């Protein structure tokens, strides 16, 4: 039976396949977009949606356990976690440490250049999804003793990490 099959006989040779990382990225962003859309339908602001999600993590001791493992304001541990999360959304990030000890991460944002179907399906804008990603990351970082500032501009996410002063967390 196998001898009757030709390699790739069912595939259109001119059709290009989406990379696995892009598929994973779309699925991860789609999950975030679903939460954002549901929250909006319930009349919540982006900040309120993020606060709700982070309260779930807090009630299950996610942040206190992380601080127990890594210590408050552990920039290196947070950087590793941040980059791991970004790998679920984007193909790569560049990292640079500044002389003042802060860390700058830049990541290309494909979803700002393209039009993923879920943006329209869930009645969202790219701006709303972008804001949601920023607020979620910044508030999460603060709970771990990290000052995180993110901007999305010209299809690039620029994130700056610093340790928060002890009195802030």
Image (spheres, rainbow, N blue to C red):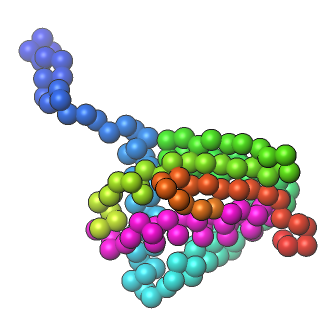
> Is 7 colored magenta in this rendering?
no
Secondary structure predominantly adopted by residues drawn in magenta: helix
Residue 74, above or below 62:
above
Name the outermost residue toward the top. 3
Residue 152, above or below 109:
below
Tell me if residue 18 can be seen: yes
Horizontal side of 93 relative to 119 (left or right) equals right
Name the outermost residue toward the left. 4
Residue shown at the point (18%, 18%) measured from the top left: 7
Tell me if residue 68 can be seen: no
The quarter holding residue 38 reads bottom left
Question: Which x, y percent locates residue 168?
Answer: 85, 73
Range of residues picked out in magenta: 121-149
Question: Which x, y percent locates residue 142?
Answer: 74, 68
Horizontal side of 120 relative to 126 (left or right) equals left
Question: Which x, y percent locates residue 144?
Answer: 77, 63
Q: Quadrant of the N terminus?
A: top left
Residue shown at the point (40%, 60%) measured from the top left: 30
Name the outermost residue toward the right. 167
Q: Quadrant of the C terminus?
A: bottom right
Horizontal side of 28 relative to 18 (left or right) equals right
Residue shown at the point (43%, 46%) measured from the top left: 24
Residue shown at the point (48%, 54%) measured from the top left: 155
Name the outermost residue toward the front. 154
Question: Which x, y percent locates residue 42?
Answer: 43, 86
Choose between 56 and 38: the one closer to the eye. Answer: 38
> Is 127 colored magenta in this rendering?
yes
């Amino acid at each position: 039976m196998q001898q009757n099959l030709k390699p790739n006989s069912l595939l259109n040779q001119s059709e290009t396949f989406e990379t696995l990382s892009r598929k994973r990225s779309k699925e991860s962003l789609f999950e975030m977009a679903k939460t954002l859309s549901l929250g909006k339908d319930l009349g919540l602001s982006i900040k309120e949606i993020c606060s709700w999600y982070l309260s779930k993590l807090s009630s299950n001791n996610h942040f206190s356990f992380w601080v127990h493992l890594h210590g408050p304001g552990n920039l290196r541990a947070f950087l590793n976690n941040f980059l791991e999360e970004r790998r679920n959304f984007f193909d790569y990030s560049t990292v640079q440490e500044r002389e003042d000890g802060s860390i700058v991460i830049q990541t290309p944002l494909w979803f700002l250049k393209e039009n993923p179907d879920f943006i329209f399906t869930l009645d969202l804008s790219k701006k709303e999804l972008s804001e949601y990603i920023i607020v979620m990351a910044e508030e999460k970082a603060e709970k771990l003793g990290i000052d995180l500032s993110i901007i999305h501009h010209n299809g690039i996410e620029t994130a700056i990490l610093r340790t928060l002063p002890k009195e802030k967390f």
